[in-house]
Image: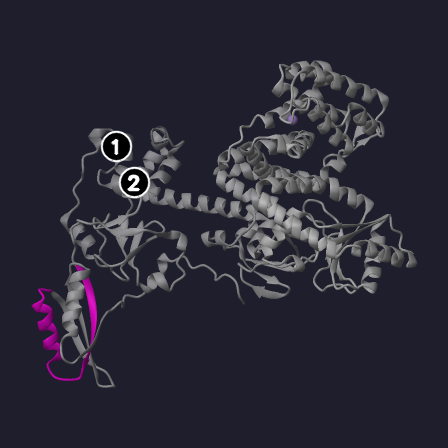
Amino acid sequence: MIRFEDLVARAQAYMPDSDIELLRRAYVFSALAHKGQVRQSGQPYLVHPLEVAYFLADLRLDPAAIIAGLLHDVVEDTLTTVDRIQELFGPEVAHLVEGVTKISAIPFSTSEERQAENFRKMLLAMVDDIRVVLVKLADRLHNMRTLAAMPDDRRQRIARETIDIYAPIANRLGMSRLKNELEDLAFHYLEPEAYEALKARVERRRKATEGLLDDLKRAMGAKLKEAQVPVAEIDGRSKRLYSIHLKLKRQKIDLEQVYDFLAIRIITPSVKDCYAALGIIHHSWPPIPGRIKDFLATPRPNGYQSLHTSVMTTKGVPVEVQIRTEEMHRQAEEGIASHWKYKEGRVGAANDERYFQWLRQTLEWQQEVRDPQEFIQNLKVDLYPDEVYTFTPKGQVKSLPRDATVVDFAYAIHTDVGHQCIGARVNGKMMPLRTRLKNGDIVEIVTNAKHRPSRDWLNHVITTRARNRIKGYLHAEEKERAVELGTKLLEKEARRFGVNVKALIEQKVLDGIAPEWGVPNGVDLLAALGYGRVGARQVLTKAVPAEQLTEKKESPVTTAVKRAFGLGGRSDSIKVSGADDMLVVRARCCNPIHGERIVGYITRGKGVSVHSAACPNVTNLLYDPERRIDVEWSTGAKQGQYTVRLTVEVEDRKGMLAAVSAKIAAVNTNILDIEARTDEDRRGWIRVTIEISDMKHLEKVMKSLRGIAGVVSVDRARAVPLDLSQTAQRPATGSR
Ligand code: MN
């Protein structure tokens, strides 16, 4: 059991006596506050804050942080107030204790929402003062070390929270020693059977290779000495259980195939010595191809720097070799904490960009992301980095998560580069947008100023940044379109009463009534109209005095013309899913018929145009999938009359035209036009335009035509030229 004098011994190594005196006061205060309290383990409560403070002193943190460690539970668990702490120990300590208390007070629940909230608060606390999180992590470590005393259900919850939240944060802050211990402890409690089984296997394998690491350490030391490469320390270790567990699971491999199961760590005085040592090692032990990683030149996002290689030993067992400087080693073990070291009575340079950039970005994202589930999802990607290192043509390193694509890379450079990217030259070769990048790829993004992101990019981007930027763009674009459509809908309705929509907008009438639908202004109201959440008639009723809303009858001629062109305004027979009030137009290219499979397409300013699902306009052209909208034939609606042209191929014999027209008449169908001709191959063609009420009707006609002797085929003609004006042509993505 640790005692206060152990803590003093630690702190004395780097602190003046005046600070030690402060620690002593804090210790006495904490002891009084927790007097009589006992931990689940039966130990006096005071042991816990003492252990936490000791861990912080081990990291050589400043007095304020260590005192906060001693006092971290007094506000939560005793009657002490933050004000009292401020009185006795000053605002800095009070602030830290308050921060830790706030994080601890978050009720833990497994729901994603709570988890997201938890993270959010941690992030805020970290940005506020990173020492708050260091104290909290130290607190969690000791709680994990003593978890055995807890009842089983609480053990599970605490272990789960540790592996989901605390270990990843420690990792992101570069504190690998702490992260490693947290993970192995949590693994032990979360999957006890898997833990024990793996432990036994690892133990067996370690036995089998016993002496190997020691021999290798000695041999490598000798070789380096011979070559006069200075070495501060050589150390051997086997990989930790949890990270083996993850590796076996992720790569579906066997323990024997884990190349870094055994590792030798070589610490040198300088960077130059690292590379020199690598050369000597490779000269004496054959390196395994593809295993050399230079994290010296391109550090991991969490700041980790080291050279990695795997070599084959004389016993045929691969061993990983890690080479780094002392400074890098400290950084690798302690991460951000190494920047908070107590130096000559002052705190060290704390604002290391590496960490704070990540913190700031994450905070920025969490403000953008409303859906907690999505936030957690995104955060997990960022917190469990499996990076690939890629380069700009100018040699700048961009580290991205594994499976990141060209689009992720583009957004990592700049939002506009992302929006406008149409492909990339990867290692000099033109590649499509969804290309997944590999380590060492040199990526040159190709942009087109007119190009815009599309929704399907969301299916292959990996990074939070790219995802959020694309979504942001799509939302803005979607809204713009909705406003456009909403305005049209309102104008259409208003025209019936001779009301001027422009005037309504200019006189801010819409702004005035918008709050009635819970939207802030007229533009948003128009958008709501476009999305179909609000009806045009409702808006008009609120916007215009009732006496002005007397309908002006449309002339019969106009109505007839509209019908003839399939422009019956809001088509009664077609329903747009989720938006009853949308302007629906049957596309003239395919003239879909009642009962046929149809798709809706949002046009610019013309409402929803409805095509037959088989229409080549929909299938062949570069229709934007984002503008598709579900439509269906409404049941019970009046069936209209549809003009359909059929092409009938017939054998060249007499009386075919008469036979065809007679058959059509026999199924009670009007013929609007009919013509026949024969081509060079002596095949006959009959084109007939008929009036059809629905799909069943059409099928009946076609079937009876096919029954005529001499008829080769009957097809529905789609001869109307493709209407390209509705299709915003976009540059093809990728290739060339
Ligand atoms: Mn505690």
> How far apart are labels 1 and 2 at the CA level?
11 Å
Hey, what amino acid is under mark 2?
A: Leu
Name the foreground residue: 672 vs 81.
81
Where residue 130 sits in the image (x, y, percent)?
68, 32
**Residue 215 in which image quadrant:** bottom right
What is the count of numbered marks?
A: 2
- Please give left or right for residue 592 compared with residue 386 in the image: left
Taking the magenta stretch, the answer to whether it contains residue 433 is: no
Where residue 273 sits in the image (x, y, percent)?
85, 53
Highlighted range, magenta: 642-669
- Please give left or right for residue 117 compared with residue 49 in the image: left
For the C terminus, give its image quadrant: bottom right
Q: Is residue 362 above or below residue 103?
A: below
Query: Label 2 near label 1: C-beta < 8 Å?
Result: no
Name the foreground residue: 113 vs 415.
113
Q: Is residue 326 above or below residue 256?
A: above
Q: Is residue 294 visible?
A: no
Q: Residues within 10 Å of mark 1 (few under 14, many from 20)?
A: few
| Location of mark 2 (residue) | 490
Does label 1 or label 2 sit earlier along the sequence? 2
Q: Residues within 10 Å of mark 2 (few under 14, many from 20)?
A: many
| Location of mark 1 (residue) | 541
At numbered mark 2, what does the secondary structure look like: helix, strand or loop? helix
Residue at image x 76%, y 37%?
338
Name the foreground residue: 651 vs 164.
164
Taking the magenta stretch, the answer to whether it contains residue 662 is: yes
Residue at image x 68%, y 52%?
202
**Residue 365 in which image quadrant:** top right
Q: Is residue 124 visible?
A: yes
Where residue 326 sits in the image (x, y, percent)?
82, 45
Hey, what amino acid is under mark 1?
A: Thr
**Quadrant hosting ligand 1:** top right
